[in-house]
Image (cartoon, coloured by chain):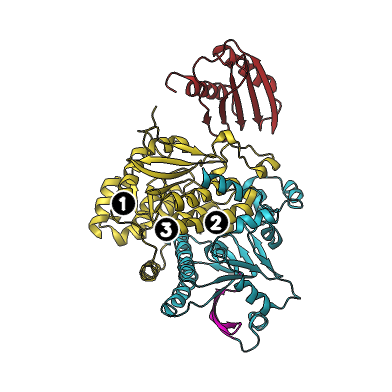
Amino acid sequence: MTGRSISYFEASARLRLSGLVDANSFSEFCPPAMRKTSPHLARLDAPLAFDDGVVVGRATLAGHSVLVAAQEGRFNGGAVGEVHGAKIRGLLDKAVSEKPAAVLLLVDSGGVRLHEANAGLIAISEIMRAVLRAQAAGIPVFALVGGSCGAFGGMGIVTRLCAEVVMSEQGRLALSGPEVIETVKGVEEFDSRDRALVWRVTGGKLRRALGEATQLVDDLIPAFRDAAADLIAKYQAQPLTPVSLEELLGEHAKLTARSERFSNARDGREIWQAIFADAARVPELSVDDFNRQLGEQA
Amino acid sequence: MSEQILFDRLFGAGGHKISSEGLFLHGLAEVDGQAISVIGTRDHAAIDVTLALRIADAILQTVRTDATTSPRPILFIADTQGQALSRHDELLGLNGYFAHVARCVDLARRQGHQLVTLIHGEAVSGGFLAYGMLADRICALPDAQVRVMDLRAMSRVAKINLEKLEELAAVSPVFAPGAENYWKMGGIHEIWSAKDNWTERLAASFASITNSDSRAAIGVERGGRKLAASIAQLVADA
Amino acid sequence: MEQFILTLPSKAPQQSAVHTVICGVVSSGNLEVLVEPLVTRDACEIVVNTSAHGFQDIWEAVLKDFAERHAVGGLRLSINDAGATPAVVSLRLDQAFETCCGDAA
């Protein structure tokens, strides 16, 4: 099994990585053999992972040099702790000096790891500053979101700081998890067990329709790879420049308009109705058809 | 402490013109004779899309006003219970609105504005991440409560025995709520005491701003976060 | 967590070059195995860290069986386990062995 034709959602972080980058091009930083595990998990007598749940390293993609980080969503919900967070931060710092074509963040995380909550929160804010710093230095960071944990909590914020967000329909991107909202505000506010609703509010198609995700791809590792390769080519042709006041004023106007246009919306169906000719069919549309129709509305 | 008393202590009576509109604070004040912008939240605000846009707008207006002159320092006042918990806000993409605020903070920094956050009241989780934690220097007032989650909720969500958490919280700053813990870990630069002269502390805070994010190194110095700096360096040097 | 270390006499030393590899994920009911070369070529060292207490006998049986089926001399296996069944442990060990020492490696 080479990992090149299987579900991105089902694959482990390492399998996603190996299928995403050029064959035999990956070399790992701070590999498992270094045993940089979490002392905080150990103190709480929780199982450890030798890579603390994130794989970081260097590779090539379509011949271009990239730095990559892949979170393992099945280890502690991909949650960010001290060591895990430091590996990602270090990778982003490295990008400023090494100047790869891009940094790829394979995000699969519920956010802060509660077992080391304060360390996780600080780590995520350090990652936020590091993403901003790398991009201000001209290196685009791409977030790939398609795993079982999606991108929630602080990692949902990190994801939206990235120059590009590639999602599959299976991916989810938001801030608070539906379960948390349900626990605090009640099931009427958000029935976290209504899977279709959860995806209509946080899923890849909805995020793509709103423009929160910049690409929607099939749940296949090669689809993510192709999207990443296309994006690398895009930034090779037109390098990233530091975000300007004008751009942020434009973005601000867009976000304000969205909040006004959908001021009472609570369900993705209302977004479909506003954007697509046949709202009822949107959930069944293939990724290709969805993208085509979305392009036609623009 | 009421905002008026806080601002009098920071800037002297008459040294500030800051208004509050609901949960949002903004205005001007003077530090060491120099005009600064004050932007923030009050009353343990839950930050939703609307409030996030107001914060972002205030930052953008400050940057725009100073675009051709000397960029004035910005003081962020953080008093937030975290992000609003609402399906509507999640649908709109609250994480993206927070990222937008973060980009505005970063723009201000790149344009030369010095950024200090003062935690007044609460600083929790996502709400704190969006702007407060991105300043150059983060200070906490004596009453500040900083946390990701309270221990009871943490015990339930992460399925860890509460007694075990309480026991460990006594010896490790790594997960339990508390400004002191964040200070030890380098997440907060300064904790002010009630006896301090807050006008002087604020001026000193602006004066000690450095260009880079040195919180991991501070965590090592203070002993609360011993690994982050070296692991990040290990990867950066690999 | 329970930890124990086993040193197993080897049926035969590993002939191919040993690549350091990791297999598996530490999720509930699963485990990861890190395989590294060991200086002593006539023994296999296995370090187990497991969240499931009281199963050392079963671990020893599974690991001895693994050592019987493969040439494990000169290998060090380090395991982080979160309650995998013996069948899953066996599978993961075999996978790890394939990856580190198989011809394809």
Same subunit, labels 1 and 2: the answer reads yes
Is the residue marked by circle 2 packed among few (<14), some (14-19), or many (20+) residues within 10 Å? many
Question: Which chain did the image draw in red?
Answer: C
Q: Which mark is residue A137?
A: 3
Q: Between marks 3 and 2, how big is the CA–CA gap? A: 16 Å
Residue type at mark 1? Gln
Kind of residue at disc 2: Glu
What chain is colored cyan? Answer: B
Q: Secondary structure at mark 3?
A: loop
What colour has chain A?
Answer: yellow
Identify the disc placed on residue A126: 2
Looking at the rendered structure, the kind of residue marked 3 is Ala
Task: Name the foreground residue: B229 vs C53.
Answer: B229
Q: Image height check: is A250 above or below A76?
A: below
- x and y percent of residue B217 in the render? 63, 55
Residue C66 within the segment the image draws in magenta: no
Marks 3,2: beta carbons within 8 A: no
Which label was assigned to residue A236? Answer: 1
Q: Is residue B43 magenta?
A: yes
Q: Which residues are magenta?
A: B16-44
Q: Chain of mark 2?
A: A
Q: Position of residue B196 (x, y in %)?
A: 73, 76
